[in-house]
Image (cartoon, rainbow, N blue to C red):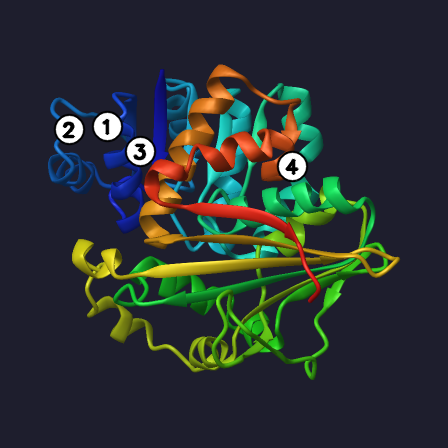
Amino acid sequence: MKIAVYGANGYQGKLVLAEANRRGLGVVLVGRDAARLRRAADAVGLSGPDVRVAAVDDRDALVAAFRTADAVVNCAGPFTRTGAAVVEAAIAAGRHYLDTAGEQLYIKSVFDGFGARAAAAGVCVVPAANDACVPGDMVAALLAERLGPLEEITSVHLISGGGGPSRGSLRSVIESIDIIKAGGLVYDGGDWRPAPSTRQSSIVLPGGGEAVPMAPFPLSEVVTIPRHVRVGRVRGLAEAELTARLSAPLDPAVIEGLPEGPTERARATQRFTYLIDAVAPDGRRARGIVEGPDTYGTTAVIAVEGARRLITDPAEPGVLAPAQAYPPADFLDSLLPGDVRWSVQASGL
């Protein structure tokens, strides 16, 4: 079994390489700079790495590189700018595809633009295989199993610690700054539309404490959940302070001078809490809770496990939400060794 990692020399790419190596899986390092790819291999302890040079605008080289593996994991953001070319090349190579994107409009464009081509090629394409979208999407499916058709789902992200975002994440923010400022898309009445700019709220974390101010945010699962859950409305919220910080102008030159990403010690201090609140038309409510450490490390685990499963037990071909590609409870349980905990419970919210 072999996984091609596009953008293998980037911050998230190296974490994916390390996770694949830890599991004893074969990897193909793909990117535009052979020397940087070899340094990435050295950094994670890969000996005799299989390095393939392919720029994002060199379709033939991408297809040839991807054909040497069984599945592709794309870690090369900003995906808004380059992701479509990598998706297309993976489909042309006849290989299953995942990416670690969190850019809402890009993720929607993959569903809108590649479903028929992926199905015709017999491959599964799973965008947004990351720490937040995968558990949020899967928990939403489990809530729908409990409650039936839903009136509304609200997905809430709260993250503390961790040493700040990587340079790659900040570059993706620049590409998505307009939609971040606008609050992203909501799903409402059968389609996606801009979030109401005035709709803010607050959330009390599990265990109590003061309410945390929240604001609309372009979360990935707003795009994926309605693909498989009968629901009238889906919206995403993040901490208002985070939204305001990411909405501020970012200087690309300043980003280039920052560390590549948080240190391993900093990542160990990070904790995330994702709440998925569901309301049925008759007023019944349930809440899903996902808690864990290290968003970047958890994303690496999810991407490698997702690729492994597509290779060994693929779903129906096409562009798929996480809960369509994998059995939700079983996949969530596979994250338990990484201290990712999840639950679904009735609630009197």
Residue 192 image offset from top left, x and y in percent: 75, 59
Residue type, numbered disc 3: Val
Read off the residue under disc 4.
114
Dot 2 amino acid type: Leu
- Of the numbered discs 4 and 3, the one sitting upstream in the chain is 3
- Residue situated in front as seen by the camera: 240 or 190: 240
Q: CA distance from mark 1 to mark 4?
A: 30 Å
Q: Which residue is mark 3?
A: 30
Name the residue beneath numbered marker 2. 46
Q: Residue at x 56, y 34 (%)?
A: 329
The residue to which callout 1 is attached is 21
Q: Earlier in the sequence, mark 1 or mark 4?
A: 1
**Marks 3 and 2, Cα distance to the nearest angstrom?**
14 Å
| Callout 1 crowding tier (Cα within 10 Å): few <14, some 14–19, many ≥20 | some
Q: Secondary structure at mark 1?
A: helix
Looking at the image, do the residues carrying marks 2 and 4 touch, with CB atoms under 8 Å apart?
no
Name the element at disc 2: loop
Secondary element at tag 4: helix
Task: Tell me if 332 is positioned left or right of 143 in this view.
Answer: left
x and y percentages locating residue 173 in the rendered image: 44, 67
Crowdedness of circle 3 by 10 Å Cα count: few (<14), some, many (20+)?
A: many
Label located before the other in sequence (2 or 4)? 2
Q: Regarding mark 3 in the picture, which secondary structure is present there?
A: strand
